Amino acid sequence: MLTVILAIVIVILLTIGIVWLIDKFVPKNFKPILHILLWGIIAFLGYSTFMSVYGEIQFNELKEKRYHIVIEKLKDIRDAELAYKQVNGKFTDNFDDLVKFIDTAKFTITQRRDSTIVDEEMTRRFGGVTMTKDIVIIDTLNFVSIKDSLFGADTRYKTMMNVPVGKPGAKFDLKAGFLDNIPVFEASVDKAILLDGEDKNLIAKEKQVVSVDGVNGPKLMVGSMDEVKTIGNWPKNYSTDQ
């Protein structure tokens, strides 16, 4: 965009120079028409320069607002997936299964305690001399609803598959599997979907972002199918909770 602005500024300066030359060398009969035409060009180019800058400012404000909204949705998906893995030992790539799980599943509250018991085998080996061994006992204390634990009375988890901004009717892409026998998942949405309806050149530029304070790459996502991680690809300025 900087190149375009420089080009427009140069054209404006050239046009002003032409106006001066006309004033110097063109016959008086032609000057009024040429002056009106050239000043009209200057006004148009000036307006174009202003709008090119202001348009990108508006785009960035809209982008940040939409990203913040979508990040909250992605964090809900991550929390639900982590709860699913804690109970089932793996992640799921099916939103219907994830919603059903939240509706019905429960966390098991346990307590670990150390204890000492008679080691009967060692006691026999030592001719009846009492021998002991240490063990860990796990007691089940209670069961807690996953829905209440994660969302309370809020039912937003039932629509967490829907992208809340941008292209109407869009859904998050959800993947799950294993990487070196370790469960992994990824929930993502293309930036073009989030920024649907905006300037295509600015969207294309945003999809190529590589920055410490920007969302790098073509997608907004949490988790990864290529790395063992459950954080999002957004920087801290978008969310204090990764």
Image (cartoon, rainbow, N blue to C red):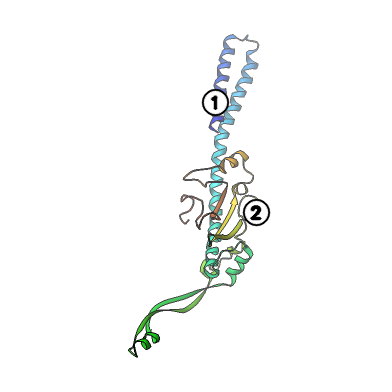
The 10 Å Cα crowd at callout 1, few under 14, some 14 to 19, many 20 or more, is: some
Q: Please provide percent x and percent y for residue 69.
A: 55, 53
As drawn, the label of residue 124 is none
Front of the two marks 2 and 1: 2
- The single residue placed furthest to the right in the displayed view is 169
At horizontal 55% and vertical 23% (from top left) the residue drawn is 10
Q: Please provide percent x and percent y for residue 42.
A: 59, 24
Q: Quadrant of residue 147?
A: bottom right
Q: Is residue 123 above or below residue 138?
A: below
**Alpha carbon of mark 2 to alpha carbon of mark 1: how far?**
41 Å
Q: Quadrant of residue 70?
A: bottom right
Please name the residue that numbered disc 1 is placed on: 9
Q: Quadrant of the N terminus?
A: top right
Depth check: give the residue in front, 9 or 116: 116
At horizontal 54% and vertical 55% (from top left) the residue drawn is 222
Depth check: give the residue in front, 46 or 202: 202
**Dot 1 amino acid type:** Val
* Count of marks, rendered view: 2
Q: Secondary structure at mark 1?
A: helix
- The single residue placed furthest to the left in the displayed view is 129
Q: Please provide percent x and percent y for residue 45.
A: 59, 27
Q: Is residue 137 above or below residue 20?
A: below
**Dot 2 amino acid type:** Ala
Q: Secondary structure at mark 2?
A: loop
Q: Is residue 124 above or below residue 169?
A: below
The 10 Å Cα crowd at callout 2, few under 14, some 14 to 19, many 20 or more, is: some
Please name the residue that numbered disc 2 is placed on: 170
- The single residue placed furthest to the bottom in the displayed view is 128
Q: Earlier in the sequence, mark 2 or mark 1?
A: 1
Depth check: give the residue in front, 77 or 12: 77
Q: Please provide percent x and percent y for residue 220.
A: 56, 51
